[in-house]
Image (tube, rainbow, N blue to C red):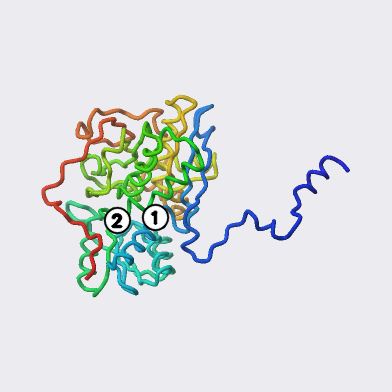
Amino acid sequence: MTNRQSSVLESVPSSPAQLLAAARSAPTPAALVGDTPVLWVGEPFTAAGRGFWAKLEGHNPGGIKDRTALYMVRAARERGQLLPGARIVESTSGTLGLGLALAGVAFGHPVSVVTDPGMEPQVAGLLRAYGAEVHTVSEPHPVGGWQEARRERVAQLLADLPDAWCPDQYHNPDNVAAYAPLARELVAQLGRIDTLVVSVGTGGHSAGIGRVLRSFFPALRVVGVDTCASTIFGQPAGTRLMRGLGSSIHPSNVAYDLFDEVHWVAAPEAVWAARALARTRYATGGWSVGAVALVARWVARTSPAEERIAAVFPDGPHRYVGTVFDDDWCRGHRLLDQVPAEDPQEIARSAEAAVSRWTRCTTVEPPAPAADEGVRGLAGVAR
């Protein structure tokens, strides 16, 4: 018998049960959430001898927000805030809506989501296929943009629907607590983490992952990734093409004290990184993934070779086939052929200048609240 024949025979299972030993099975769709893989992202996307580990949350049924949707719904049911069979109503740009549709199926609740014209048709179609109602606002709020317009429509629906409940992802602390398992998965998978690179939108997964990891690794460096024209870290509000990160309001879940630095990334830079990832690593995603990958690539190049860097990729590429990965759409928005600089520009404080390209700031402070912002949380609201 040749060595090759011996090797082949050794790899053949001795019993049918062994064929399923590594397969994953689940009694409910909710049980498919979690235990997502990590992937080494190295050259040619990164510099030679450098790289980072990407947590691929696109391996969840709908994306990273499956975790928080299930957690928030379960917690509200346990507290009696969400009654059996009551409707769930929430604002979303897409990923949380998919998670809430999953939670609605898992726990037996009808779901209504409020979105805006920027939601991709594929996502809206999926939400309807999963049984969710989709309400689309037609005009942005003059101060809070599309987010505030969506939230106002949510408030209207809550007033009209008896017993309806809103998780209010922007201000609900359960949105933070939901990500502790993800952080523990990273610890088990990587053993040691020196730097976390994470996008910031509602503030939920950045705070939830970062706080738990820092309890394991007190010297952890946390790098937040935002988008230009987002108000989260004190930049002036503006029109934002990128979805899934950034905000036109100030979510109370953002843990400002957690971050060592923040980077703002522009849409063309995120598109370049998402497409480069696809070509070189066959693992990519949309706006958040592109922005996070660009920053993690720089962190890897500028850090010692032994530094262990974890980056969170919130979703996969499928919903972005008609946007980030569509040449005609990108040309129409002037997003192609704009290779990012090797290094970000630097500002000392967020209020120093309005940024329009990849920019880094190592002084992270909470922004002053807008005069009309007040307390607008809808968490736990039922009508």
- Badge 2 marks a residue whose secondary structure is loop
Q: Residue at x 23, y 44 (%)?
A: 231
Q: In whole angstroms, how far apart are the C-alphas of marks 2 and 1?
A: 10 Å
Q: Is residue 32 left or right of residue 66?
A: right
| 10 Å crowding of disc 1: few (<14), some (14-19), many (20+) | many
> On the image, which quarter does residue 197 sit in?
top left
Q: Is residue 235 left or right of residue 296?
A: left
- Badge 1 marks a residue whose secondary structure is helix
Q: Is residue 20 left or right of residue 216?
A: right
Asked whether the beta carbons under mark 2 and mark 1 sit within 8 Å of each other, the answer is: yes
Q: Is residue 46 left or right of residue 173?
A: right
Query: As rendered, which of 245 and 11 lies closer to the eye?
Result: 11
Task: Give the percent coordinates (x, y) of residue 227.
Answer: 31, 42
Residue sticking out furthest to the left: 371
> On the image, which quarter does residue 98 sit in?
bottom left
- From the viewer's perspective, is residue 78 above or below residue 193? below
> On the image, which quarter does residue 99 sit in?
bottom left
- From the viewer's perspective, is residue 86 above or below residue 179? below
Q: Residue at x 79, y 43 (%)?
A: 7
Q: Residue at x 22, y 48 (%)?
A: 250
N-term mark: 2 or 1: 1
Amino acid on which the number 1 mark rests in the picture: Lys
**Quadrant placement of the C terminus:** bottom left
Residue at mark 2: 169
Task: Give the percent coordinates (x, y) of residue 195.
Answer: 41, 34
Residue 65, disc: 1
Task: Give the percent coordinates (x, y) of residue 129.
Answer: 44, 69
Amino acid on which the number 2 mark rests in the picture: Gln
**Quadrant placement of the N terminus:** top right
